[in-house]
Each structure stands twice: as structure tokens, then as C-alpha cells.
């Protein structure tokens, strides 16, 4: 027996986004002509208590129209008219969606740099989340190169919690910063200065200072930069961090806070 073409169309409408009862009622009206709500209930099999809600929704979307009163009769709108409305609604929805996405990008990436190939975060919420999550995720070792005491103060509790589970090495650029470290800290050995690092911003040649770098399990790196008072967080997973972290850890010595 060949498949019922109306049932096939009904299933296709559902696949295109129509709800089951909407598809059933619309196909019923379109295929049978002018019907009352009770007749639609009988022919479509949609529960009587749901028929009026679905009819109101189809009418609002422009698929059907009503006429007369007591009883009200329903009929399907011409396909051309429905198609035109669907196109207009789709374009309007796409425009609204594009506007929302653009606004989301402006909020999350206010600097508009978005370096290709690197995970980039530009809001305090995103930066805090990434740093704290990675400190919790790390299961072997964390190395922190810190050039700014504000970073140690902001993530002090998270660093202490991580240090209870795994080795955490805080390497500061000078003794004055040791006071701000929530755990014992280190400096690069004498003769090997730890100069302030800089990184490029976007694809242009402008470089900005690094406030801190976090090396997680010698697998990934997160760097916190500051550009005109705005913090940026760059995350990168690569094998280079293995050699960098190993080289640094071989050349550090314990430092005591200055009195």
C-alpha cells in the first residue's frame, strides 16, 4: 500500500518546525476546505481541548483565517500568501539574531581584537571563570609567572586551594611581590632577570604587557594582559608550554617576603 501523501506532508511540516497538533490541524483544514472547530477535532484527531489554542496560534502565524460567527469557520490561506509571510518573518528573525550576536560579541569582546587560533576572553567574568576553572581542573602542577601583585590578590583563595592538591609554583619578578603571594613563592635565580613580558594584540604590531602567565599541567597556557586599563585573557593549548615550564622550574629559588 502506498503511503498517504497527506500524512507524509504532515510529517514533513513537523520536521520543518511545526508542532504535531499544528501540522495535523493545518493539513486537515487545507485538504478539507471550510470547517468548524468541532469538525476539525473530528477529522484531525486533535483533542477537543487543544483545538482552539492551536487554531488561534495558526491564525496568528498567518496559516489560516476565520470567518462568520456562531459557529466560526476556518479556512487555509493561499500558499503564496503564507510563503511570503514566512520569508518576511524568517528575514526579520535573522536580522534580530544577527543583532543579538553582534551585541553579544561587543559585550564579550569590547576591544574587538579576537586573535585567530587563540582562545580569547575580554570580560572580568570570562577571565575569572577561566583562571579559577583551570586551577580546579589541574591535576599535576601549576606554574604561575606573576608580574603584577593584583593577580595574586585576586586569585589568592583559588591558588591556596589548588596548592592543597598539587604542586603550585608562584614565580614573582621581585621580592616586593612576595608579600602578596598566598603561598610560598619563588624568583628566577640570580643572573637570569625576569623582565616584564609583552604580547601582540590581534594581528597588528601593537604589543601589550603581560600581568601573569599560568601554565597548567605543562599542557596549556593562559596569559592575562592589560590594554588601556582593559584586561584580556589569552588561552593556548600546545606542547611549547611543556618546555617553557620545565626550563623555568629548573631555574628558580625560594624567596622570602621582605620585612
Image: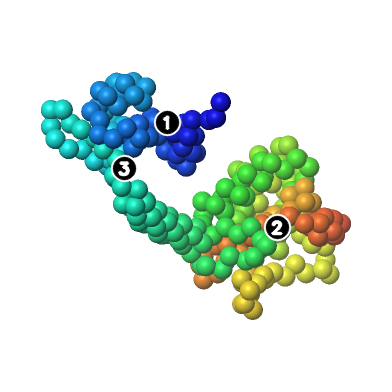
Q: CA distance from mark 1 to mark 2?
A: 46 Å
- Judged left or right of residue 192, residue 233 is left
Q: CA distance from mark 2 to mark 3?
A: 51 Å
- Comparing labels 1 and 2, the label whose residue is closer to the camera: 1
Check whether the beta carbons of the residues at disc 1 and disc 2 lie within 8 A of each other: no
Instruction: Name the spot of residue 223 as percent of width and height, x first.
Output: 66, 60
User: SS at mark 3?
Assistant: loop
Figure quadrant of the N terminus:
top right
Instruction: Name the spot of residue 38 as percent of width and height, x first.
Output: 25, 23
Decide: few, some or many residues near mark 2? Use Cα within 10 Å; few <14, some 14-19, many ≥20.
some
- Comparing labels 2 and 3, the label whose residue is closer to the camera: 3
**Residue shown at the point (49%, 38%) measured from the top left:** 12
Mark before the other along the chain sequence, 2 or 3: 3
Residue 236 numbered mark, or none: 2
Instruction: Name the spot of residue 233 as percent of width and height, x first.
Output: 60, 59
Mark before the other along the chain sequence, 3 or 1: 1
User: SS at mark 1?
Assistant: helix
In the rendered image, which residue does mark 1 sit on? 20
Figure quadrant of the C terminus:
bottom right
In the rendered image, which residue does mark 3 sit on? 63
Amino acid at each position: 500500500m502506498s503511503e498517504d501523501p497527506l500524512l507524509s506532508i504532515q510529517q514533513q511540516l513537523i520536521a520543518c518546525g511545526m508542532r504535531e497538533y499544528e501540522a495535523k490541524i493545518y493539513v486537515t483544514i487545507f485538504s478539507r476546505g471550510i470547517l468548524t472547530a468541532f469538525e476539525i477535532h473530528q477529522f484531525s484527531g486533535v483533542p477537543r481541548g487543544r483545538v482552539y489554542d492551536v487554531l488561534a496560534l495558526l491564525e496568528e502565524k498567518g496559516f489560516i483565517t476565520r470567518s462568520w460567527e456562531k459557529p466560526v469557520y476556518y479556512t487555509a490561506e493561499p500558499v503564496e500568501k503564507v510563503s511570503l509571510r514566512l520569508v518576511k518573518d524568517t528575514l526579520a528573525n535573522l536580522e534580530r539574531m544577527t543583532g543579538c550576536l553582534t551585541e553579544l560579541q561587543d559585550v564579550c569582546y569590547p576591544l574587538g581584537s579576537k586573535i585567530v587560533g587563540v582562545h580569547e576572553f575580554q570580560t572580568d567574568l570570562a577571565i575569572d571563570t577561566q583562571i579559577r576553572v583551570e586551577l580546579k581542573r589541574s591535576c599535576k602542577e601549576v606554574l604561575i609567572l606573576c608580574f603584577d601583585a593584583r593577580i595574586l590578590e585576586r586569585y589568592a583563595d583559588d591558588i591556596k586551594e589548588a596548592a592543597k592538591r598539587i604542586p603550585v609554583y608562584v614565580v614573582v619578578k621581585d621580592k616586593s611581590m612576595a608579600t602578596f603571594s598566598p603561598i610560598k613563592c619563588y624568583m628566577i635565580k640570580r643572573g637570569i632577570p625576569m623582565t616584564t613580558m609583552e604580547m601582540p594584540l590581534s594581528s597588528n604590531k601593537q604589543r601589550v604587557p603581560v600581568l601573569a602567565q599560568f601554565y597548567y599541567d605543562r599542557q596549556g597556557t593562559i596569559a592575562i594582559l592589560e590594554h588601556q586599563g582593559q584586561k584580556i585573557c589569552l588561552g593556548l593549548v600546545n606542547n611549547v608550554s611543556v618546555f617553557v615550564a620545565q626550563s623555568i622550574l629548573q631555574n628558580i629559588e625560594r624567596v622570602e617576603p621582605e620585612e
